[in-house]
Image (cartoon, rainbow, N blue to C red):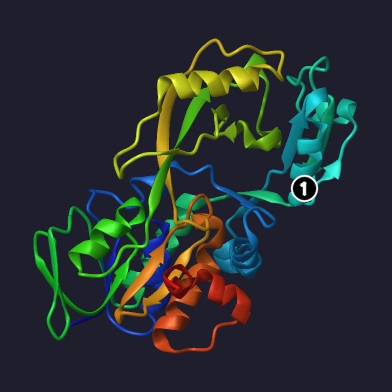
Protein backbone atom coordinates (compact mmCIF):
# COMPACT_ATOMS: atom_id res chain seq x y z
CA UNK A 1 0.00 0.00 0.00
CA UNK A 2 1.35 3.40 -1.05
CA UNK A 3 1.02 6.15 1.54
CA UNK A 4 1.16 9.06 -0.93
CA UNK A 5 0.52 8.61 -4.65
CA UNK A 6 1.62 11.78 -6.49
CA UNK A 7 0.09 12.48 -9.91
CA UNK A 8 2.36 14.78 -11.90
CA UNK A 9 6.12 14.84 -12.47
CA UNK A 10 6.71 18.59 -12.68
CA UNK A 11 8.18 20.74 -9.96
CA UNK A 12 4.93 20.69 -7.94
CA UNK A 13 4.78 16.91 -7.78
CA UNK A 14 8.50 16.33 -7.31
CA UNK A 15 8.82 18.82 -4.46
CA UNK A 16 5.67 17.58 -2.70
CA UNK A 17 6.84 14.00 -3.13
CA UNK A 18 10.24 14.79 -1.66
CA UNK A 19 8.67 16.35 1.44
CA UNK A 20 6.07 13.61 1.91
CA UNK A 21 8.65 10.84 1.42
CA UNK A 22 9.86 11.67 4.93
CA UNK A 23 6.44 10.63 6.26
CA UNK A 24 5.61 7.48 4.32
CA UNK A 25 5.98 5.53 1.12
CA UNK A 26 5.72 7.74 -1.98
CA UNK A 27 5.09 6.77 -5.58
CA UNK A 28 5.06 9.51 -8.22
CA UNK A 29 3.50 8.86 -11.62
CA UNK A 30 3.98 11.01 -14.72
CA UNK A 31 2.03 10.62 -17.98
CA UNK A 32 4.94 11.61 -20.24
CA UNK A 33 8.19 9.73 -20.74
CA UNK A 34 10.26 12.37 -18.90
CA UNK A 35 9.88 14.47 -15.76
CA UNK A 36 9.23 18.19 -16.17
CA UNK A 37 7.98 17.68 -19.72
CA UNK A 38 5.34 20.43 -19.85
CA UNK A 39 5.40 23.70 -17.91
CA UNK A 40 8.33 22.85 -15.64
CA UNK A 41 10.58 22.17 -18.63
CA UNK A 42 9.66 25.50 -20.27
CA UNK A 43 10.15 27.92 -17.40
CA UNK A 44 11.96 31.26 -17.49
CA UNK A 45 13.70 29.94 -14.34
CA UNK A 46 13.86 33.16 -12.33
CA UNK A 47 13.69 33.89 -8.61
CA UNK A 48 12.55 37.37 -7.63
CA UNK A 49 11.41 37.56 -4.03
CA UNK A 50 8.97 40.45 -4.62
CA UNK A 51 7.32 38.96 -7.72
CA UNK A 52 3.72 37.87 -7.30
CA UNK A 53 0.65 38.47 -5.09
CA UNK A 54 1.12 38.63 -1.29
CA UNK A 55 0.77 34.91 -0.58
CA UNK A 56 3.26 34.12 -3.36
CA UNK A 57 5.72 36.69 -2.02
CA UNK A 58 5.41 35.01 1.39
CA UNK A 59 6.23 31.66 -0.21
CA UNK A 60 9.15 33.24 -2.09
CA UNK A 61 10.59 34.60 1.15
CA UNK A 62 10.14 31.26 2.89
CA UNK A 63 11.83 29.46 -0.06
CA UNK A 64 14.83 31.78 -0.36
CA UNK A 65 17.13 30.08 2.16
CA UNK A 66 16.53 26.63 0.65
CA UNK A 67 17.19 27.83 -2.88
CA UNK A 68 20.24 29.78 -1.77
CA UNK A 69 21.88 27.24 0.54
CA UNK A 70 20.57 23.69 0.08
CA UNK A 71 22.87 21.31 -1.82
CA UNK A 72 25.25 24.14 -2.65
CA UNK A 73 22.46 26.45 -3.75
CA UNK A 74 20.42 26.73 -6.93
CA UNK A 75 20.67 30.49 -7.54
CA UNK A 76 22.98 32.54 -9.76
CA UNK A 77 22.81 36.37 -9.74
CA UNK A 78 21.01 37.82 -12.75
CA UNK A 79 19.10 41.01 -11.91
CA UNK A 80 16.10 42.55 -13.67
CA UNK A 81 16.20 45.78 -15.67
CA UNK A 82 12.83 47.44 -16.28
CA UNK A 83 12.72 49.82 -19.24
CA UNK A 84 10.02 52.11 -20.58
CA UNK A 85 9.55 54.86 -23.12
CA UNK A 86 8.63 58.43 -22.23
CA UNK A 87 4.84 57.93 -22.36
CA UNK A 88 4.95 55.03 -19.87
CA UNK A 89 6.03 56.89 -16.75
CA UNK A 90 2.96 56.16 -14.52
CA UNK A 91 2.96 52.43 -15.32
CA UNK A 92 6.74 52.32 -15.08
CA UNK A 93 6.61 53.75 -11.56
CA UNK A 94 3.96 51.20 -10.52
CA UNK A 95 6.04 48.29 -11.83
CA UNK A 96 9.23 49.58 -10.23
CA UNK A 97 7.50 50.00 -6.86
CA UNK A 98 5.92 46.53 -7.00
CA UNK A 99 9.32 44.90 -7.53
CA UNK A 100 11.16 47.17 -5.08
CA UNK A 101 13.39 48.43 -7.89
CA UNK A 102 15.90 51.26 -7.81
CA UNK A 103 15.53 53.91 -10.51
CA UNK A 104 18.56 53.90 -12.76
CA UNK A 105 19.89 56.68 -15.04
CA UNK A 106 19.21 55.69 -18.63
CA UNK A 107 22.90 55.97 -19.54
CA UNK A 108 23.70 53.38 -16.88
CA UNK A 109 20.96 51.11 -18.21
CA UNK A 110 22.51 51.37 -21.68
CA UNK A 111 25.92 50.54 -20.23
CA UNK A 112 24.51 47.35 -18.71
CA UNK A 113 22.63 46.33 -21.89
CA UNK A 114 24.24 48.10 -24.87
CA UNK A 115 21.53 47.11 -27.36
CA UNK A 116 18.97 49.35 -25.63
CA UNK A 117 17.95 52.29 -27.84
CA UNK A 118 18.94 55.60 -26.24
CA UNK A 119 16.28 57.33 -28.32
CA UNK A 120 13.50 55.12 -26.92
CA UNK A 121 14.44 54.26 -23.33
CA UNK A 122 13.34 57.15 -21.14
CA UNK A 123 12.89 55.29 -17.84
CA UNK A 124 14.90 52.48 -16.27
CA UNK A 125 14.98 50.72 -12.90
CA UNK A 126 16.92 47.73 -11.62
CA UNK A 127 16.53 44.97 -9.09
CA UNK A 128 19.71 43.16 -8.10
CA UNK A 129 17.77 40.59 -6.05
CA UNK A 130 16.71 38.50 -9.07
CA UNK A 131 18.45 35.19 -9.71
CA UNK A 132 18.52 32.40 -12.27
CA UNK A 133 17.34 29.10 -10.82
CA UNK A 134 19.06 25.86 -11.80
CA UNK A 135 15.68 24.26 -12.42
CA UNK A 136 16.99 21.00 -13.83
CA UNK A 137 19.18 20.29 -10.82
CA UNK A 138 16.41 21.32 -8.43
CA UNK A 139 14.01 18.81 -10.00
CA UNK A 140 16.67 16.11 -10.07
CA UNK A 141 17.46 16.67 -6.40
CA UNK A 142 13.81 16.43 -5.37
CA UNK A 143 13.56 13.21 -7.39
CA UNK A 144 16.69 11.90 -5.69
CA UNK A 145 15.18 12.58 -2.26
CA UNK A 146 12.08 10.57 -3.18
CA UNK A 147 14.18 7.62 -4.29
CA UNK A 148 16.62 7.88 -1.35
CA UNK A 149 13.66 7.67 1.03
CA UNK A 150 12.44 4.48 -0.63
CA UNK A 151 9.98 6.04 -3.05
CA UNK A 152 9.38 5.22 -6.69
CA UNK A 153 8.98 7.37 -9.81
CA UNK A 154 7.10 5.90 -12.77
CA UNK A 155 6.96 7.68 -16.15
CA UNK A 156 4.72 6.86 -19.13
CA UNK A 157 1.91 6.30 -16.63
CA UNK A 158 -1.13 8.22 -17.89
CA UNK A 159 -4.09 8.09 -15.53
CA UNK A 160 -7.23 6.63 -17.11
CA UNK A 161 -9.42 6.01 -14.07
CA UNK A 162 -9.58 6.75 -10.35
CA UNK A 163 -11.91 5.30 -7.76
CA UNK A 164 -12.15 5.45 -4.01
CA UNK A 165 -13.00 2.42 -1.90
CA UNK A 166 -11.45 2.46 1.54
CA UNK A 167 -8.35 3.72 -0.32
CA UNK A 168 -7.55 5.23 -3.72
CA UNK A 169 -7.27 2.93 -6.74
CA UNK A 170 -5.65 4.57 -9.75
CA UNK A 171 -5.29 2.91 -13.16
CA UNK A 172 -2.36 4.34 -15.13
CA UNK A 173 -1.32 1.38 -17.25
CA UNK A 174 -0.81 -0.46 -13.99
CA UNK A 175 -2.96 -0.24 -10.89
CA UNK A 176 -1.75 1.79 -7.91
CA UNK A 177 -3.38 1.63 -4.49
CA UNK A 178 -2.80 4.47 -2.05
CA UNK A 179 -4.04 5.90 1.22
CA UNK A 180 -3.59 9.48 -0.03
CA UNK A 181 -3.71 10.97 -3.52
CA UNK A 182 -1.75 14.14 -4.32
CA UNK A 183 -3.02 16.05 -7.36
CA UNK A 184 -0.03 17.87 -8.88
CA UNK A 185 -1.08 17.44 -12.50
CA UNK A 186 -0.57 21.06 -13.57
CA UNK A 187 -2.99 22.12 -16.30
CA UNK A 188 -4.80 18.79 -15.88
CA UNK A 189 -5.59 19.04 -12.13
CA UNK A 190 -9.31 19.56 -12.68
CA UNK A 191 -9.49 16.53 -14.98
CA UNK A 192 -7.84 14.42 -12.28
CA UNK A 193 -10.22 15.80 -9.65
CA UNK A 194 -13.29 14.95 -11.73
CA UNK A 195 -11.99 11.40 -12.28
CA UNK A 196 -11.63 11.11 -8.51
CA UNK A 197 -15.13 12.42 -7.79
CA UNK A 198 -13.76 15.64 -6.28
CA UNK A 199 -15.08 19.10 -7.19
CA UNK A 200 -12.69 20.94 -9.56
CA UNK A 201 -11.10 24.25 -8.59
CA UNK A 202 -11.65 26.09 -11.87
CA UNK A 203 -8.10 25.89 -13.18
CA UNK A 204 -7.34 28.01 -16.26
CA UNK A 205 -4.21 27.14 -18.23
CA UNK A 206 -2.70 30.18 -19.95
CA UNK A 207 -0.18 29.96 -22.77
CA UNK A 208 3.12 31.84 -22.70
CA UNK A 209 5.38 31.75 -25.76
CA UNK A 210 9.14 32.10 -26.09
CA UNK A 211 11.63 32.62 -28.91
CA UNK A 212 15.34 31.81 -28.76
CA UNK A 213 17.50 34.21 -30.78
CA UNK A 214 21.21 34.39 -31.50
CA UNK A 215 23.02 36.72 -29.10
CA UNK A 216 22.07 40.18 -30.46
CA UNK A 217 24.83 41.97 -32.29
CA UNK A 218 27.24 39.18 -31.44
CA UNK A 219 27.48 40.44 -27.84
CA UNK A 220 28.44 38.28 -24.90
CA UNK A 221 25.08 38.38 -23.08
CA UNK A 222 26.07 36.16 -20.16
CA UNK A 223 26.24 39.01 -17.63
CA UNK A 224 23.27 41.00 -18.89
CA UNK A 225 20.24 41.31 -16.60
CA UNK A 226 16.81 40.10 -17.56
CA UNK A 227 14.91 42.87 -19.39
CA UNK A 228 11.26 43.67 -18.63
CA UNK A 229 9.01 45.91 -20.65
CA UNK A 230 6.56 48.06 -18.70
CA UNK A 231 3.40 46.18 -17.81
CA UNK A 232 5.33 42.96 -18.53
CA UNK A 233 4.47 43.50 -22.20
CA UNK A 234 7.58 41.45 -23.05
CA UNK A 235 10.73 40.18 -21.41
CA UNK A 236 14.14 38.99 -22.56
CA UNK A 237 17.01 37.22 -20.86
CA UNK A 238 20.26 35.36 -21.52
CA UNK A 239 19.98 31.62 -21.98
CA UNK A 240 23.10 29.48 -22.47
CA UNK A 241 24.81 32.08 -24.66
CA UNK A 242 21.63 32.84 -26.58
CA UNK A 243 18.91 35.44 -26.03
CA UNK A 244 15.30 34.46 -25.32
CA UNK A 245 12.37 36.85 -25.78
CA UNK A 246 8.78 36.33 -24.67
CA UNK A 247 5.65 38.33 -25.53
CA UNK A 248 4.48 37.57 -21.96
CA UNK A 249 1.02 36.63 -23.16
CA UNK A 250 -1.45 34.90 -20.87
CA UNK A 251 -3.97 33.48 -23.33
CA UNK A 252 -6.43 30.90 -21.90
CA UNK A 253 -6.22 27.54 -23.68
CA UNK A 254 -7.37 23.99 -22.90
CA UNK A 255 -4.84 21.66 -21.22
CA UNK A 256 -2.45 20.61 -23.98
CA UNK A 257 1.12 20.19 -25.15
CA UNK A 258 1.44 23.89 -25.90
CA UNK A 259 3.00 25.47 -28.97
CA UNK A 260 3.84 29.11 -29.62
CA UNK A 261 1.31 31.16 -31.55
CA UNK A 262 3.21 32.72 -34.46
CA UNK A 263 1.16 35.92 -34.55
CA UNK A 264 1.37 36.46 -30.78
CA UNK A 265 5.10 35.80 -30.90
CA UNK A 266 5.60 38.24 -33.79
CA UNK A 267 3.72 41.01 -31.94
CA UNK A 268 5.75 40.42 -28.79
CA UNK A 269 9.02 40.51 -30.69
CA UNK A 270 7.90 43.78 -32.29
CA UNK A 271 7.27 45.31 -28.84
CA UNK A 272 10.74 44.20 -27.78
CA UNK A 273 12.31 45.58 -30.98
CA UNK A 274 10.84 49.01 -30.26
CA UNK A 275 13.26 49.38 -27.33
CA UNK A 276 16.49 48.04 -28.85
CA UNK A 277 18.85 48.84 -31.68
CA UNK A 278 19.38 45.26 -32.88
CA UNK A 279 16.50 43.95 -35.03
CA UNK A 280 15.34 40.34 -34.78
CA UNK A 281 16.70 38.75 -37.93
CA UNK A 282 16.45 35.10 -37.02
CA UNK A 283 14.50 32.96 -34.54
CA UNK A 284 16.42 29.77 -33.87
CA UNK A 285 13.53 28.00 -32.15
CA UNK A 286 10.34 28.75 -30.29
CA UNK A 287 8.13 27.03 -27.77
CA UNK A 288 5.32 27.67 -25.29
CA UNK A 289 4.35 26.56 -21.82
CA UNK A 290 1.16 26.65 -19.78
CA UNK A 291 0.91 28.63 -16.56
CA UNK A 292 -2.20 27.49 -14.70
CA UNK A 293 -4.23 29.79 -12.45
CA UNK A 294 -7.34 29.72 -10.27
CA UNK A 295 -9.61 32.75 -9.97
CA UNK A 296 -7.51 34.67 -7.42
CA UNK A 297 -4.16 33.96 -9.10
CA UNK A 298 -2.44 32.16 -6.24
CA UNK A 299 -1.63 28.56 -5.35
CA UNK A 300 -3.97 25.86 -4.02
CA UNK A 301 -2.19 23.73 -1.43
CA UNK A 302 -3.23 21.00 0.99
CA UNK A 303 -6.04 18.52 1.64
CA UNK A 304 -9.48 18.94 0.10
CA UNK A 305 -12.04 19.66 2.84
CA UNK A 306 -14.50 17.22 1.22
CA UNK A 307 -11.94 14.39 1.44
CA UNK A 308 -8.66 15.10 3.26
CA UNK A 309 -7.01 12.11 1.56
CA UNK A 310 -7.20 14.06 -1.73
CA UNK A 311 -4.42 16.65 -1.58
CA UNK A 312 -3.88 19.60 -3.92
CA UNK A 313 -0.60 21.05 -5.15
CA UNK A 314 -1.97 23.21 -7.93
CA UNK A 315 -2.36 26.68 -9.43
CA UNK A 316 1.34 27.50 -9.46
CA UNK A 317 0.93 29.94 -12.37
CA UNK A 318 4.38 31.30 -13.15
CA UNK A 319 5.63 30.86 -9.59
CA UNK A 320 6.20 27.11 -9.34
CA UNK A 321 9.98 26.91 -9.08
CA UNK A 322 10.56 29.95 -6.91
CA UNK A 323 7.90 28.86 -4.39
CA UNK A 324 8.56 25.11 -4.50
CA UNK A 325 10.55 24.66 -1.27
CA UNK A 326 7.99 26.44 0.92
CA UNK A 327 4.90 25.35 -1.02
CA UNK A 328 5.87 21.69 -0.80
CA UNK A 329 6.65 22.01 2.89
CA UNK A 330 3.21 23.52 3.48
CA UNK A 331 1.58 20.66 1.56
CA UNK A 332 3.40 18.18 3.80
CA UNK A 333 2.59 20.10 6.99
CA UNK A 334 -1.12 20.39 6.20
CA UNK A 335 -1.28 16.74 5.17
CA UNK A 336 0.52 15.32 8.20
CA UNK A 337 -0.85 17.73 10.80
CA UNK A 338 2.49 19.40 11.52
CA UNK A 339 2.55 23.07 12.50
CA UNK A 340 3.48 25.21 9.46
CA UNK A 341 6.05 27.97 9.78
CA UNK A 342 4.00 30.30 7.57
CA UNK A 343 1.60 32.74 9.22
CA UNK A 344 -2.12 31.98 9.44
CA UNK A 345 -3.16 34.68 6.94
CA UNK A 346 -0.83 33.31 4.27
CA UNK A 347 -1.98 29.74 4.89
CA UNK A 348 -5.63 30.77 4.58
CA UNK A 349 -4.82 32.47 1.25
CA UNK A 350 -3.35 29.22 -0.07
CA UNK A 351 -5.84 26.63 1.17
CA UNK A 352 -8.70 25.40 -1.02
CA UNK A 353 -11.35 26.51 1.46
CA UNK A 354 -11.01 30.13 0.27
CA UNK A 355 -12.42 29.14 -3.15
CA UNK A 356 -15.51 27.35 -1.79
CA UNK A 357 -16.95 29.89 0.61
- Quarter of image, res 279: top right
User: Picture coordinates of residue 353 (x, y %)?
Assistant: 44, 75
User: Picture coordinates of residue 161 (x, y %)?
Assistant: 12, 63
What secondary structure is found at the residue carrying circle 1? loop
> Which residue lies under the disc numbered 1?
128
Left of 218 or right of it: where is 8?
left
- Quarter of image, res 216: top right
Left of 224 or right of it: where is 248?
left
* Residue at (87% x, 36% y) in the render: 104
- Give above or below for 306 relative to 158: below
- Give above or below for 230 relative to 35: above
Q: Nearer the viewer, residue 149 or 167?
A: 167
Pick the quarter of the image with the C terminus. Answer: bottom left
Q: Most extreme residue toward the front, as rendered?
A: 357
* Residue at (60% x, 65% y) in the render: 55
Q: Nearer the viewer, residue 68 or 321?
A: 321
Is residue 348 among the parts visible in the rendering? yes
User: Picture coordinates of residue 23 (x, y %)?
Assistant: 37, 85
Amino acid sequence: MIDFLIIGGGIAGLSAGARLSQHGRVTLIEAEDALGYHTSGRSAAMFEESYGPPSVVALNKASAAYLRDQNGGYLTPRGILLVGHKDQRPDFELDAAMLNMQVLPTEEALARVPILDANKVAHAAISTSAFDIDTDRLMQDFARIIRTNGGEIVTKARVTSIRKDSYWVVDAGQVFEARNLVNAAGAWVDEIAVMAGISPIGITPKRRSMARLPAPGGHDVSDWPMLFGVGEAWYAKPDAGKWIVSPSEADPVPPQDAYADDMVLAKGLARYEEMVTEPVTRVETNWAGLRSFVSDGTLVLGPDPADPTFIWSAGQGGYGFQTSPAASQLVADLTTGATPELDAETIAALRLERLRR
